[in-house]
Image (cartoon, rainbow, N blue to C red):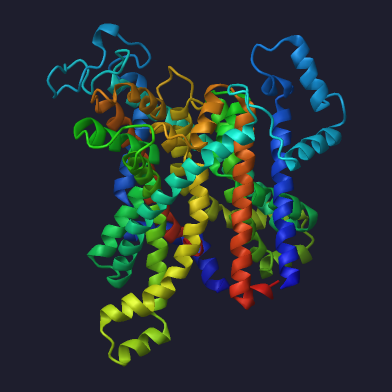
């Protein structure tokens, strides 16, 4: 088993097989489009996403009666252009999603390696905290933290990092426990490498794959959590254009049947999360067959 | 068996200690917890009284002991907004959340189990593929958005169902569906893999060899055994549903504990927020313990592990 696992983890070989079997183009295209929208939001968006004209409130999309070409996807309850807000919302989701996933990933991976390799009381402390924190539903935990520190984009990233590092720590620790028994690690010990060197040079490169797979799968989870926090009013503070916030605003026009304010931001969230999940599933099978149970 | 029980209970208690310490530390991390625990606009004398009460001038360990003592006496403080003990408020709302969770569970099992069986019986067929797409959608559509779409369709366009509140059986349908939707995908996946495992076993081969009709093999022999892990997960998820329903309860103004937590954050009612989080942790640690102990009773192999 060790041999086949080592083969799986050898990166160059995997890259070759990526080319052979092809990348999953649909999720990559969707994510790339969202990323481009996020980067060039200032150039693409037709209007200022935070300034509305009260005379233009609740305009339907252009193809419906009463819509105008000036606001292709209509306007919201204070007359802001929905299309521009969706485009700038991509930026919020991308920035918060990626930074939170990376932050949680780095913290979780480092603590997971320390727990797995050092063992003893370090392991006990880290894993008891991990177990206890995993008992709290992520959203409830995040809301509790948000209630303490108050809303801002920066705080959301930190909160999501605190809530989600435990998932990485548990998986990485498990991997390290089996890596620790490998011959090359034992040889490194015999050769007199320090614990730091072994963890950095011999353990870390071998858990990076799992961490990347997990990060891709967590991206969707993190984006949904951010949207839920913003929807509840403890996430990204208004008037910033975040998709979850747009859904909360959209509730104001829901009973009047202003569907575009509810349907469109949700479709954006769904497309992004769906793409992240598809890509994550594909990467999981490709990079790390052992993670299939995740 | 006794050793296993002692170990497992001790482990659960340790989790609760870590959880309480976590909450204690985070509340004090921002500096002055009296800012969180005193009503906005309280007088200087009130703030000083709370400070003395919490013993903020005393060492942290003493403060933590006071905090835990309060929890053990089930004293969670008073709500700033409702001016009643938080625990009373919580227990008042709990039945509503349980009702919502039970109906949501019924929905999720009614969707998840049949589709999981179909997917397993026709592996890699059309049903299996449809099931996979359904599971992906379940994971990718946030429950609050599903809730909003339901309101748009059934309340606004069709006018069939009430959009918010509670009282009649009609009120529970949409929030329950929105909440059950996400879990249906998980139940489908587990039913599928559990059925596949059972269908590959010896006694199913025997049942087929002795000439039983396929419907009977699947419906009677395989289904019953495949159901055990699914029902275990459903038990855990029922408790989880009570604790993750905040967004759905907010969308539908359903008066459960999730809505209480939402009111807690909108009214800056910190004792309510803190209590909801603590009780949610306690409930989940308890249900995990219960499941582990039950499994140990049923399956002796688990008892002797480790």
Query: Is residue B282 visible to the viewer in this orientation of the structure?
Result: yes
The C terminus of chain B appears in which quarter of the rendering? bottom right
* A18 up-or-down from B84: above or below: below
Query: What is the count of numbered marks?
Result: 0
Q: Position of residue A189 (x, y in %)?
A: 76, 63
Q: Is residue B294 left or right of residue B238?
A: right
Who's the residue at 43% across and 32% down the image?
B250
In front here: B25 or B81? B81
Q: Is residue B267 left or right of residue B57?
A: left
Q: Quadrant of residue B86?
A: top right
Q: Outermost residue toward the front?
A: B168
* B180 up-or-down from B223: above or below: above
Q: Is residue A30 left or right of residue B37?
A: left
The N terminus of chain B appears in which quarter of the rendering? bottom right
Q: Position of residue A240 (x, y in %)?
A: 43, 19
* B120 up-or-down from A165: above or below: below
Who's the residue at 73% across and 53% down the image?
B13
* B277 up-or-down from B300: above or below: above
Q: Position of residue A98 (x, y in %)?
A: 49, 37
In front here: A285 or A16? A285
Who's the residue at 33% across and 46% down the image?
A27
């Amino acid at each position: 088993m060790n041999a086949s696992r080592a083969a799986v983890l050898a990166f160059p070989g995997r890259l070759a097989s990526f080319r052979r079997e092809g990348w999953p183009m649909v999720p990559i295209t969707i994510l790339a489009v969202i990323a481009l929208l996020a980067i060039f939001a200032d150039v693409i968006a037709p209007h200022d996403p935070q300034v509305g004209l009260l005379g233009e409130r609740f305009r339907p999309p252009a193809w419906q009666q009463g819509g105008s070409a000036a606001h292709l996807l209509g306007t919201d309850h204070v007359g802001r252009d929905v299309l521009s807000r969706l485009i700038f919302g991509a930026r919020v989701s991308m920035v918060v999603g990626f930074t939170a996933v990376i932050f949680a990933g780095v913290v979780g991976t480092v603590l997971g390696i320390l727990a797995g390799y050092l063992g003893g009381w370090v392991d006990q402390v880290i894993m008891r905290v991990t177990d206890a924190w995993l008992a709290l539903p992520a959203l409830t935990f995040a809301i509790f933290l948000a209630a303490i520190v108050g809303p801002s984009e920066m705080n959301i990233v930190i909160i999501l990092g605190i809530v989600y590092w435990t998932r990485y720590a548990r998986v990485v620790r498990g991997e390290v426990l089996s890596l620790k028994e490998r011959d090359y690690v034992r040889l490194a010990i015999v050769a007199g490498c320090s614990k730091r060197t072994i963890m950095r040079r011999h353990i870390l490169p071998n858990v990076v794959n799992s961490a990347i797979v997990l990060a891709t799968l967590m991206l969707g989870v993190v984006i949904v959590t951010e949207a839920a926090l913003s929807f509840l009013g403890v996430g990204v503070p208004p008037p910033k254009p975040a998709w979850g916030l747009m859904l909360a605003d959209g509730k104001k026009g829901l009973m009047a049947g202003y569907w575009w304010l509810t349907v469109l931001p949700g479709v954006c969230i769904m497309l992004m999360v769906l793409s992240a999940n598809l890509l994550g599933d594909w990467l999981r099978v490709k990079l790390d067959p052992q993670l299939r149970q995740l | 068996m006794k050793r296993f029980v002692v170990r497992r209970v001790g482990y659960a208690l340790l989790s609760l200690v870590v959880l309480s310490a976590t909450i204690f530390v985070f509340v004090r991390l921002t500096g002055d917890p009296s800012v969180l625990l005193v009503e906005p606009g309280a007088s200087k004398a009130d703030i000083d009284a709370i400070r003395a009460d919490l013993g903020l001038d005393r060492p942290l360990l003493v403060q933590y002991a006071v905090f835990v003592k309060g929890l053990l006496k089930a004293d969670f403080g008073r709500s700033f907004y409702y001016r009643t003990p938080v625990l009373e408020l919580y227990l008042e709302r709990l039945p509503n959340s349980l009702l919502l969770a039970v109906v949501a569970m019924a929905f999720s099992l009614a969707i998840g189990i049949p589709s999981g069986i179909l997917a397993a019986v026709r592996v890699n067929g059309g049903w299996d593929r449809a099931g996979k797409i359904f599971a992906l959608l379940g994971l990718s559509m946030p429950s609050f958005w599903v809730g909003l779409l339901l309101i748009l369709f059934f309340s606004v366009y069709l006018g069939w169902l009430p959009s918010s509140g509670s009282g009649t059986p009609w009120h529970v349908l949409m929030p329950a569906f929105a909440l059950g939707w996400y879990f249906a995908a998980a139940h489908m996946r587990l039913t599928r893999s559990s059925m596949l495992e059972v269908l590959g076993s010896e006694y199913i081969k025997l049942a087929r060899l002795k000439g039983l009709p396929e419907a009977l093999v699947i419906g009677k022999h395989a289904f019953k055994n495949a159901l055990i892990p699914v029902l275990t997960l459903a038990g855990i998820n029922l408790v989880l549903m009570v604790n993750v329903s905040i967004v759905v309860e907010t969308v539908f103004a359903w008066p459960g504990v999730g809505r209480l937590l939402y009111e807690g954050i909108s009214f800056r009612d910190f004792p309510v927020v803190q209590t909801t989080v603590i009780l949610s942790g306690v409930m989940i640690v308890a249900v995990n313990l219960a499941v582990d102990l039950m499994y140990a009773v049923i399956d002796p192999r688990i008892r002797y592990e480790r």
